[in-house]
Amino acid sequence: MNRCIMLMVLLAALLSGCEVDNGGGWNEPLIPVSLKGIQTVNIDNSGEFPKISAAPIKKEAYVVGVKWIADDLPSDDDEYITDPVRWGEQQYGMVADHYERSVVCLTPFNADIPAGSNVSKYFKKINYLPEDVDEGFALLVAPDPGVHRFRMEYYYAGELEFSHETTAIEFF
Amino acid sequence: MKRNLLLLIALIACTALLRAQEQRESNGGKLRPRIDIQLVQHIGLDAWSDAGYVTDGLPPVQMTEIRGVLGLHVKPAFNLFGDMGIGITPASAMKSFDLGRMPLPNSGTGYYLREMLSETGTGKTAAHFKMTAGWFGNFRVGERCRIMPHAGLGVLSMEGRSYEMILKEDGSNAQYRTTYAWGRDFDYDEDYPEVLPMGYLTGRVNVQFPLTRKLDLMLGLEYTHFLTEINFQTRYVNTFNENIRKDITVKGNRANMIGLSVTLLGSR
């Protein structure tokens, strides 16, 4: 019986020790980052690997890519040194999580959709992108062939925070 | 593999126990068990499926088996047997996944493998657990020869195999979450099966004759007919709207094998 109790105490001590290790933190500290702007690129997704392109793109294989412009300055106003950020919203991959995205066509999309229309519903997010592109949105409804331009917009709480226009790209 | 090892251990333990019982009952009991260790080579008479890519993903219908057989002698024409063994199948023709062999969402269109989401099973040489039970006769022919016809029902545990991946269409943004699964029924199975229990009927004829004064040789010819077929299913789901683009089911064959067994045993 005594041996049992001793074993249980030992086990509890070991477990609590593990917890202290995890909570006490040897996790690598993260550098806080915040989104300062966006830059759009035209992506040709017709082949095995998507690539940034200025050449004409097949209209069924167009992706608008977004590069985030971020800095490593904290976005909060703390006057005193705070604990390292261990996890949360300030990781680089999550800097744009709170933003709503929208795409506006700057040229006529087709005979029914004039320039200036919101065409967000024709785009879906994809994850397989060129290495230096942070977000990509695949165009799933082919517009008319010809030269097209789009504007990517990032909204926060309904307010437009960032926007960037793509360069003119020819669809065939 | 771990499961097969455990079963092998169980088989050895069971054999040892029965051997002890055999010794005890030979001293006066009426029920005389007979235990043999047999080596069997099975050769397939047909394929798991008529579709080449389905068969390529499975081990060939061919097996080298080592099994322990327990026979309970009741009457010369009515005896019972049970066996447990490990069957080793060679590697499948498609050892590792090859998209070039598989059906695609639209024929004539190229597809790229963007991301492998999950895979179960392998195409490598594998060991499978096998178990049979049934009836056998034991008829004396001449002074030391015996003919023993067997009929039984058994089960073979085959390893399931499946792949889930993202396929991207050449020349467009279209992409599909694609599943290739051997032995899975999308309508009933929520998970990919790790083990496919394959039921079979077997008929065997063993002939035992003396090799030396103290050693007999038993040769057997056997036929196995599988009662279970391995169906193959493919599903393509559009990743953008979760619509099922296509479901394909390829019905499998009830395969047959013929086998030759060899047993060395002491003269009785």
Image (tube, coloured by chain):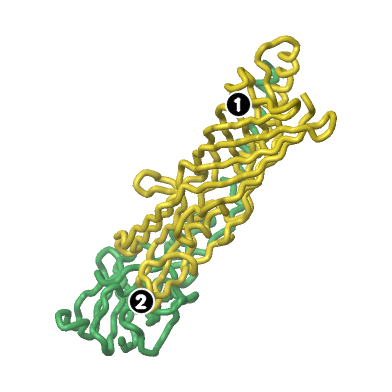
Chain colours: A green, B yellow
Q: Residue B137 carries which label?
A: 1
Q: Is residue A66 visible?
A: no
x and y percentages locating residue B90 in the rendered image: 63, 53
Mark 1–mark 2 distance (CA, rounded to whole Å): 67 Å
Kind of element beneath mark 1: loop
Would you say residue B29 is visible in this rendering?
Answer: yes
Q: Which of marks 1 and 2 is in front?
A: 1
Residue under the image location 54 percent in, 37 percent down: B202
Q: In which quarter of the image is residue B234?
A: bottom left
- Disc 2 is placed on an element classified as loop
- Residue at screen point 65% across, 35% down: B206
Q: In this rendering, would B64 be left or right of A96?
A: right
Which quadrant: the C terminus of chain B?
top right
Amino acid type shown at disc 2: Ser
Q: Which mark is residue B27?
A: none
Chain of the residue that carries numbered disc 2 in the rendered image: B
Q: How crowded is mark 2: few (under 14 residues within 10 Å), some or many (20 or more)?
A: many
In the rendered structure, which disc, 1 or 2, sits on the residue that comes first in sequence? 1
Rate crowding at label 1 as few (under 14), some (14 to 19) or many (20 or more) other CA atoms within 10 Å: many
Say whether residue B220 is left or right of residue A91: right
What residue would you read off at disc 2?
Answer: B172
Q: Could you tell me the amino acid type at mark 1?
A: Gly
Outermost residue on the front side: it is B142
In this view, the residue in front, B137 or B89, is B137
Which chain's residue wears label 1? B
x and y, in percent, of residue A97 in the image? 38, 63
Q: In the rendered image, which quarter is residue B179 located in?
A: bottom left
Report the front residue among A43 and A40.
A43
**Residue B48, x across and y down, in percent:** 49, 52
Q: Residue at x 67, y 12 (%)?
A: B30
B229 or A126, which is in the foreground?
B229
